[in-house]
């Protein structure tokens, strides 16, 4: 819950800053610092405008996303999208699209593992999947038309609201269990 709130507040603050308005596609200072690290091996991401990035910096982000998917049932995008935007310097649209692509495989592994252990309600999963497919199509087409700065702002607002809701739920559980 704290992570969600901090990501949300940080993203909202950054998306409203004068630097964000002046350089909407320029990489953040943190991304430039990571790109300058002398920590081989490096990967080149020409489609994202990244000439050289330390491979070993990407791995912990991927591990964290996988752990979150397996433990909490989230795709890891709440971690990976800000990681790709602020640590790697990708545009918001590229970070969202890349996160969605990797989530397909992460979710498949997590889902298979949970299904093997009997933790899946197939009817509920089918209903949610049907609605999610329509929502994903709508979201993807909307994302391509929204400015990167606004997309970061919406992402930050969403993360902050979810963090607050999780905190409220946690507080209710603590006080109602006694």
Image (tube, rainbow, N blue to C red):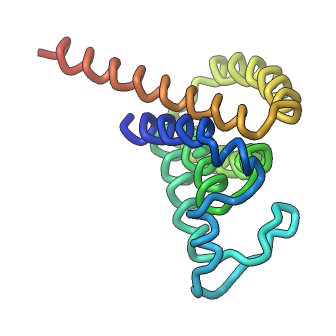
Q: Nearer the viewer, residue 96 or 64?
A: 96
Q: Residue at x 55, y 52 (%)?
A: 65
> Which one is nearer the viewer's eye here, 69 or 136?
136
In this picture, residue 1 sits left or right of residue 149: left
**Where in the figure is residue 53, as x and y percent of width and height?**
68, 75
> Please, is residue 25 above or below residue 52 in the view?
above
> How far across and down, in percent of the image, does residue 25 sit?
77, 52
| Image position, residue 57 (x, y; %) | 57, 71
Q: Which quadrant of the view contains residue 146?
A: top right
Q: Position of residue 29 (x, y in %)?
A: 59, 63
Vertical relation: 96 (above or below) 9:
below
Count the marks.
0
Residue 75 in sight from this viewpoint: no
Instruction: From the viewer's perspective, tell me whether residue 151 is left or right of residue 111.
Output: right
Q: Quadrant of the N terminus?
A: top left
Where is 139 relative to 80, above or below? Answer: above
Q: Is residue 103 visible?
A: yes
Horizontal relation, residue 74 to residue 127: left or right: left
Q: Residue at x 84, y 23 (%)?
A: 138
Quarter occupied by residue 44: bottom right
Q: Residue at x 55, y 35 (%)?
A: 12
Say which residue appears at 62% left-offset and 64% top-offset.
31
Quarter location, residue 129: top right
> On the rendered image, what quadrant is the C terminus found in?
top left
User: Residue lying furthest left in this view?
Assistant: 178
């Amino acid at each position: 819950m704290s992570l969600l709130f901090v990501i949300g507040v940080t993203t909202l603050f950054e998306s409203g800053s004068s630097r964000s308005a002046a350089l909407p596609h320029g990489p953040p200072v943190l991304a430039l610092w990571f790109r300058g690290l002398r920590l081989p091996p490096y990967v080149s991401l020409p489609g994202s405008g990244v000439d050289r990035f330390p491979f070993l910096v990407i791995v912990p982000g991927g591990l964290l996303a996988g752990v979150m998917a397996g433990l909490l049932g989230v795709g890891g995008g709440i971690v990976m999208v800000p990681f790709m935007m602020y640590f790697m310097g990708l545009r918001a649209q590229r970070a969202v699209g890349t996160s969605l692509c990797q989530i397909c495989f992460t979710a498949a592994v997590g889902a298979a593992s949970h299904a093997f252990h009997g933790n899946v309600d197939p009817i509920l999963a089918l209903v949610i999947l049907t609605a999610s497919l329509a929502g994903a199509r709508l979201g993807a087409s909307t994302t391509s038309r929204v400015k990167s700065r606004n997309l970061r702002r919406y992402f930050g607002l969403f993360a902050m609201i979810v963090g607050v809701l999780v905190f409220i739920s946690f507080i209710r559980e603590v006080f109602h269990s006694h």
